[in-house]
């Protein structure tokens, strides 16, 4: 994804004590919501664009681009726990991460434009795997490993294998977007030795025929040897089992979704930034997607009402919903929410969902927690 696209998507959504309030979503599922406010100083951020979550200790981790560090926060105690200072030079140099994970108490892994790097809590680099232009592997002449905002860098089973979102190096969306989508392979599997397997998962066929502008984001989660993913312009949920290598497309109910609409523009408008933004704003947007043992969660943002098409109005007037499906893709319930989101800091620990929410001030890092109660 281009830096321009990331900036525009962030711009669209970014501007807008722990009290528990019970809510009823339907007769099938109950949930409660809580606000989490973590005090911070001038050395931490009130919103993080690149984040990770450790469900083992319920810690939130955010990359601080101003201090070149990973800041760690406890969501249980609402406290800042400390930082991992990353080095800007020398043998332990680490570039700004595109994504990262905590693997255990003293082991972390990050991916940037050139390497996958393992490091400890002191910032000491233990191992590197060359990727993209730093690797001589022929795979990278046509593909580029490029996860984006909390999406597309997934640990597969253990700390030595990853599934990574691709960028297409064969074509350009600005030169020939139709060819870009037709020749796209979405995900690659890579291990700690640098061995690569192209999973040969294509863009949905609708993208071969219509141009949805910036509404071409792909969201993914990995769960029990299955990769789940969806496209921001389409309501269907896709799955890819790593053992069978079969892609399945699952139709889900859209009957309850407000202002469901999908706009498209001609392929020859691929360099018209205004048109690319406009089609995203007017359209419904699906994703991110999350998994638990019981449910599939997917975020929905409605199309903008007629007459509400500038950045501020679209951000405020789009209706936002957490869709909850069972494992057979039946809709269980819709949970509406009224705060603005980017696609950073949305994660779950089984049936507890967390959203990083827009800052109210410079003194706190804010989250909304949804606790679903299975009947």
Image (cartoon, rainbow, N blue to C red):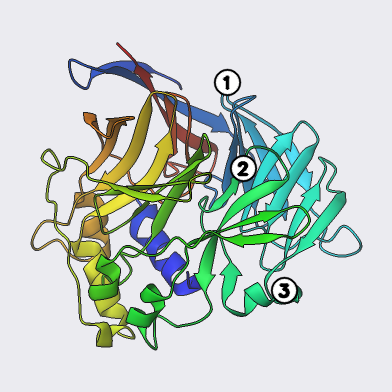
Q: Earlier in the sequence, mark 3 or mark 1?
A: 1
Q: Earlier in the sequence, mark 1 or mark 2?
A: 1
Could you tell me which secondary element the residue under label 3 belongs to?
loop
Q: Nearer the viewer, residue 330 or 62?
A: 330
Q: Which residue in the rendered view is the most extreme toward the front?
A: 244
User: Is 321 above or below relative to 55?
Assistant: below
Q: What's the distance in space between the residues labelled 3 and 1, CA to CA?
A: 44 Å
**Between tags 1 and 2, which lies in front?**
2
Q: Residue 137, which numbered label?
A: 3
**Percent coordinates x, y for residue 220 in the rendering:** 45, 49
User: Is 343 above or below relative to 196?
Assistant: above
Q: How many marks?
A: 3
**Percent coordinates x, y for residue 285 in the rendering:** 27, 54
- Residue at image location 35% in from the left, 55% down from the top: 13
Residue 120 is left or right of residue 356, and the answer is right
Could you tell me which secondary element the residue under label 1 belongs to?
loop
Q: Earlier in the sequence, mark 3 or mark 2?
A: 3
Q: Nearer the viewer, residue 197 or 40?
A: 197
Q: Which quadrant of the view contains residue 273?
A: bottom left
Which residue is labeled 1 in the image? 76
Residue 335 is left or right of residue 217, and the answer is left
**Percent coordinates x, y for residue 280 in the rendering:** 26, 65
Quarter of the image where the C terminus is located: top left
- Residue at image location 85% in from the left, 52% down from the top: 125
């Amino acid at each position: 994804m281009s830096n321009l696209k990331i900036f525009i998507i962030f711009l669209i959504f970014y501007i807008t004590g722990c009290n528990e309030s019970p809510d009823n979503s339907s007769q099938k599922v109950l949930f409660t919501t809580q606000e989490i406010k973590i005090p911070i100083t001038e050395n931490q951020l009130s919103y993080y664009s690149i984040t990770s979550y450790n469900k083992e200790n319920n810690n939130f981790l955010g990359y601080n681009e101003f201090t070149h560090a990973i800041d760690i926060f406890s969501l249980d105690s609402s406290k800042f726990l400390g930082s991992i200072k990353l080095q800007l030079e020398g043998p332990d140099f680490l570039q700004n991460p595109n994504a990262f994970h905590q693997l255990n108490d003293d082991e972390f892994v990050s991916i940037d434009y050139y390497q996958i790097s393992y490091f400890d809590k002191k910032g000491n680099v233990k191992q590197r795997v060359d990727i993209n232009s730093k690797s001589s592997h022929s795979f990278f002449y046509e593909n580029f490993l490029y996860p984006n905002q909390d999406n597309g860098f997934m640990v597969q089973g253990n700390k030595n294998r990853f599934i990574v979102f691709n960028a297409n190096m064969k074509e350009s969306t600005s030169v020939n977007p139709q060819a870009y989508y037709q020749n796209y392979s979405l995900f690659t599997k890579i291990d700690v030795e640098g061995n690569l397997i192209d999973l040969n998962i294509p863009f949905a066929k609708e993208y071969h025929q219509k141009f949805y502008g910036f509404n071409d984001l792909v969201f993914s989660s990995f769960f029990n040897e299955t990769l789940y993913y969806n496209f921001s312009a389409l309501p269907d949920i896709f799955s890819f089992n790593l053992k069978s290598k079969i892609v399945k497309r699952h139709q889900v109910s859209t009957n309850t979704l407000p202002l469901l609409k999908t706009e498209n523009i001609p392929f020859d408008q691929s360099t018209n930034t205004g048109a690319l933004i406009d089609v995203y704003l007017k359209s419904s947007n699906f994703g991110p997607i999350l998994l638990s043992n019981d449910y599939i969660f997917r975020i929905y943002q409605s199309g903008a009402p007629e007459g509400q098409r500038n950045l501020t109005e679209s951000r405020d007037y789009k209706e936002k919903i957490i869709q909850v499906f069972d494992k057979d893709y039946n809709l269980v319930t819709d949970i509406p929410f009224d705060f603005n989101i980017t696609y950073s800091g949305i994660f779950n620990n089984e049936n507890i969902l967390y959203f990083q929410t827009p800052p109210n001030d410079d003194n706190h890092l804010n989250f909304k927690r949804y606790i679903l109660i299975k009947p």
